[in-house]
Image (tube, grey):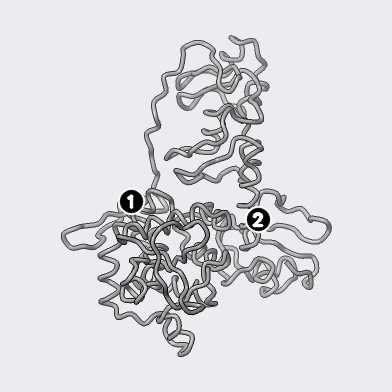
Amino acid sequence: MKKRNLALTIFLLSGAASFAQPPAVVKQYIELYRDLAIEEMKRTGVPAAITLAQGIHETDAGRSKLVIKSNNHFGIKCKTGWKGESVSHDDDARGECFRKYNDPMDSYRDHSDFLKARSHYAFLFLLDPTDYEGWCYGLKKAGYATNPKYSQILIKLIKEYGLQDYTLVALGRKEIFDDKNSIVKIIEPEEKREVIFEKKEQNYPKTVFKINQTNVVFVTKGTSYLAIAERYKLSLPRLFEFNDMVAAEETESDRLVYLQRKRKEGAKEFHIVEPGETLYDIAQAEGIRLESLLSYNYLREGINPSPGRNLYLKSGGKSTAEQTATGMQQAGYTTTSQNNGEWKSDSYKIHIVQLKETMYAVAKKYAVTVEAIRQWNNLQTDNLKKGQQLRINRNQNVAY
């Protein structure tokens, strides 16, 4: 989406600050719309920090001509399929068509739905919602704006006005003290915080039953796996194989135990992720092999999908998931189709970043330059995170 407004034009001409809004005006905008951003994050997963930063920037903190006449807080143009009201506004060209809303809430909801519904933004929802830099750079790479400094502008706003706090509020990691209109405390230290969700109670039969045409039994915490295997005349290794698990003595919680190999496809098209569900939980609940679930959605083990996300249970949904993976690769992210540590076609390998590992250390390890790694992975900074995947080419002249 191509967009520019008055504040952006000033930035490009002056090369000074990334935004020109007076702090008091920005703070007033935040107070007015923070709750909308938080609710939208809970509804769709778009980080509240990102929503607020875009709203501040796109509207010149609520003062732009476009927002005044249209309640359009995110500069979304009419595009194909828009059936609502519209206004004419000069942007990349004179008299362009922009969406008009009756209320700011409608604009905020449409912004979330706009990002959620388009495949080239889908990779963003695989990021940790607290990774605001990843979201900022991802929005730019996915084509949300043409300004080369768009990512930096959003990051600066988030840092300067503490917008990350509102993402943490939406996640339940911080609280707002309404009397003072400010965030007052962290509920628990983020690095030590254990989120516990109450899963929906299921009334499973007490005898063998079927899920996705596969025999399964529900057992309580502390049940011996050997006892289950002997009762249903299975070898213990086969029981663990059927349930995508490593050997264990007894069940750590109430759970489903399959007595047959699960199917490669689910009984329905997709599964909507519930709060607290892991990929393994979903594979068990739907009676589908974990490897199939990962493959259909271009995911890897250990990733906990965001609540509300649709996970494909059949290969028919793979085309949409494939678009997600393509979008990730175009934006500089890697997928599970690339095997960790193996040279692909004698041209490149994937390096998994270790704890406290620096870009310089990675470059030195493979005898390449830091600049080459940045180029191959479309990186804007040298900041790395544990578990991040980096493409390393054999030949520094090989383009990504």
Q: Position of residue 57 (x, y in %)?
A: 40, 73
- Corner quadrant of residue 198: top left
Q: Tell me which amino acid carries mark 1.
A: Glu
Q: Position of residue 121 (x, y in %)?
A: 54, 57
- Residue at 25% across, 70% down: 28
Label whose residue precedes the other's in the sequence (1 or 2): 1
Residue at the extreme left of the image, as rendered = 179
The foreground one among 100 and 217 is 100
Q: Tell me which amino acid carries mark 2.
A: Thr
Q: Is residue 136 left or right of residue 321?
A: left
Q: At numbered mark 1, what does the secondary structure look like: helix, strand or loop?
A: loop
Label 2: few (<14), some (14–19) or many (≥20) C-alpha neighbours in 10 Å: some
Q: Position of residue 276 (x, y in %)?
A: 43, 39
Residue at the extreme bottom of the image, as rendered = 14
- Residue at 32% across, 54% down: 169
- Residue at 54% across, 68% down: 140
Q: On screen, 50 above or below 8?
A: above
- Corner quadrant of residue 350: bottom right
- Corner quadrant of residue 332: bottom right
Q: Which mark is residue 42?
A: none
Q: Quadrant of the C terminus?
A: bottom right
Q: Is residue 295 left or right of residue 59?
A: right
Q: On screen, 273 above or below 160?
A: above
From the image, tell me which residue sits under label 2: 326
Q: CA distance from mark 1 to mark 2?
A: 37 Å
From the image, tell me which residue sits under label 1: 188
Q: Is residue 25 left or right of residue 202?
A: left
Label 1: few (<14), some (14–19) or many (≥20) C-alpha neighbours in 10 Å: few
Q: On screen, 341 above or below 142?
A: above
Q: Position of residue 3 (x, y in %)?
A: 48, 73
